[in-house]
Image (cartoon, rainbow, N blue to C red):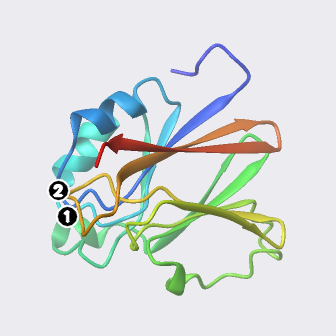
Amino acid sequence: MRNQSATIRIGLISDTHNLVRPEALAWLAGVDAIVHAGDICKPDVLDALARIAPVTAVRGNNDRGPWADGLPHATTLTTGDVAIHVVHDIADLRINLQQARIDVVVTGHSHKPSMATRDGVLFVNPGSAGPRRFKLPISAGMLLIEGAHVKVELRTLVAG
């Protein structure tokens, strides 16, 4: 169900590694759609997210088996006036972003939340919402889209 405002909210999550944290579900509650940037590890994760909102997911390097065979390695979706390209590992980015008119690239893999704009394209990694790796935060993100304008929020879900 669309929210009542003009802002479209896209929840960003990655590297769950078969762990659906209640903090992640609470962060995603009420979004219009969810993007999972790979390393899902079990289809139950996608089922849990789909109970919140429609899910677009890509295959990560740890997504194996018949259930994962149907996941694309990369995909592009358009929300409002914004084209979002999703790929698990930034090293696997294979399209010309300017030619494809991509506004946002969502990746995962590194488990490090980040956002940067390069050549007019917003690159977002929501970090990992799954098991803690080293001393990296447990995190997720949110795209807030109004027409062609995009804001991003990164959120630490579990403290230190």
Most foreground residue, 78 or 151: 151
Residue 73 percent coordinates (x, y): 43, 75
Residue drawn at x 50%, y 38% is 33
Q: Which residue is mark 1?
A: 41
Side of 15 where 53 appears, left or right: right
Q: Which residue is mark 2?
A: 18
Which of the 4 quarters of the picture holds residue 55? top left
Residue type pointed to by label 1:
Cys
The answer to whether residue 125 is seen in the rendering is yes
- Where disc 1 sits, the SS reads loop
Query: In this picture, is 102 found above or below 81?
Result: below
Most foreground residue, 158 or 89: 158
Side of 6 where 137 appears, left or right: left
Query: In this picture, is 159 found above or below 118?
Result: above
Query: In this picture, is 111 found above or below 48?
Result: below
- Where disc 2 sits, the SS reads loop
Are there few (<14), some (14-19), or many (20+) residues within 10 Å of tag 1? many
Residue 93 percent coordinates (x, y): 58, 81
Q: How many marks can you see? A: 2
Which of the 4 quarters of the picture holds residue 101? bottom right
Q: Are marks 1 and 2 in contact (CB under 8 Å)?
A: yes
Of label 1 and label 2, which has the lower sequence position?
A: 2
Residue drawn at x 74%, y 82% is 96
Residue drawn at x 35%, y 55% is 137
State how far apart marks 1 and 2 are (Cα).
5 Å
